[in-house]
């Protein structure tokens, strides 16, 4: 299935460094966004390792027979390898101790896309003008919203809004949420860090995501909207569009 893509990443308006990372391997059908946290240099290192390890796991298994079940296993393995590698590095260095990262990844297969995530980076789908979120944040505020004890608006302002309940870089036995979605021509996928959706409402994301065939422009405008909203955090977006002549 053919697709086109673009990406953008920006430190935002208030942070000196960018601890987000993204990976694009169109040759493998793989796209990743990661939001690092912890320590001094730690966040940057953790998100970069996650992107590298997930890409390496997919690249070294690219010869395996295709199909959604196999693709899901390969992606899950990549997350587990990243978890191990980040934990090992953190244990070996005082400066990197406590580092961790979120990650959201999509692997395009012939008939579908496999998605996987840990933490509060998100995957959205824009189909026929409607925006759907395909991931559930592993975050304290999301748990409160789902339990009905916090509204979406209150979650956005809550002092604990950055608290993730699951991250890559912890003990073995990481639980990775993995799913599968049948794709349709013109579907637009958006992978992003919380620096986008913490300040840009879904209605605005949908409007920008759908309005141009120039995907670099779309990514630029999404980052611009986050910065126009104050740019409190690093912001990273990857957009993947399924081509109309697919199949
Ligand atoms: Ca962030």
Image: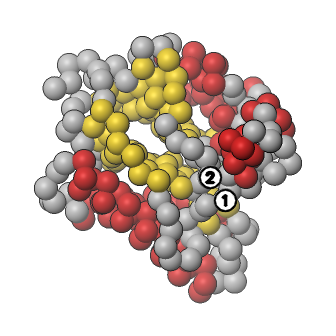
- Give the color scheme: rainbow, by chain, secondary structure or one colour: secondary structure
Answer left or right for 146 relative to 181: right
State whether label 2 is within 8 Å of ligand 1.
Answer: no
Answer left or right for 192 relative to 24: right
**Gap between marks 1 and 2, in whole Å?**
5 Å
Answer left or right for 9 relative to 187: right
User: 81 or 9: nearer the eye?
Assistant: 81
Pick whichever of labels 1 and 2 is earlier in the sequence. Answer: 2
Q: Which residue is mark 1?
A: 165
Find numbered disc 2 in the image and state the secondary structure of the residue it sits on: loop
Q: Residue 112: x and y, percent?
A: 27, 37
Q: Mark yes or no: residue 90 visible.
A: yes
- Quadrant where the C terminus sits is top left
Task: Please report contact status of discs 1 and 2: CB closer than 8 Å, yes or no.
Answer: yes
Above or below, 4 relative to 92:
above
User: 121 or 46: nearer the eye?
Assistant: 121
- Quadrant where the N terminus sits is top left
Q: Residue 210: x and y, percent?
A: 49, 16
Q: Mark yes or no: residue 45 visible.
A: no
Find numbered disc 1 in the image and state the secondary structure of the residue it sits on: loop
Q: Which residue is mark 2?
A: 138
Q: Residue furthest bottom?
A: 92
Above or below, 232 relative to 3:
below
Residue under the image location 13 percent in, 56 percent down: 65
Residue under the image location 50 percent in, 17 percent down: 130
The image quarter containing residue 203 is: top right
Residue under the image location 56 percent in, 77 percent down: 171
Above or below, 31 relative to 225:
below
């Amino acid at each position: 299935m053919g697709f086109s893509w673009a990406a953008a990443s920006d430190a935002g308006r208030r942070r000196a460094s960018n601890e987000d990372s993204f990976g694009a391997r169109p040759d493998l059908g793989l796209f990743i966004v990661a939001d690092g946290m912890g320590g001094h240099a730690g966040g940057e290192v953790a998100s970069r390792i996650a992107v590298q390890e997930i890409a390496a796991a997919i690249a070294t298994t690219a010869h395996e027979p295709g199909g959604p079940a196999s693709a899901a296993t390969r992606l899950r393995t990549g997350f587990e390898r990243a978890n191990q590698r980040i934990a090992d590095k953190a244990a070996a260095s005082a400066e990197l101790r406590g580092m961790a990262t979120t990650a959201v990844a999509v692997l395009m297969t012939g008939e579908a896309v496999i998605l996987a995530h840990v933490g509060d980076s998100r995957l959205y789908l824009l189909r026929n003008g409607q925006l759907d979120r395909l991931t559930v944040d592993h975050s304290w505020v999301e748990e409160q919203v789902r339990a009905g004890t916090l509204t979406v608006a209150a979650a956005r302002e809550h002092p604990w809004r950055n608290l993730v309940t699951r991250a890559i870089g912890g003990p073995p036995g990481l639980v990775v949420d993995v799913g599968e979605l049948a794709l349709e021509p013109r579907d637009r996928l958006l992978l992003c860090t919380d620096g986008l959706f913490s300040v840009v409402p879904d209605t605005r994301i949908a409007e920008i995501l759908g309005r141009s065939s120039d995907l670099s422009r779309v990514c630029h405008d999404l980052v611009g909207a986050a910065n126009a909203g104050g740019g409190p955090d690093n912001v990273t977006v990857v957009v993947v569009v399924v081509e109309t002549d697919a199949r």
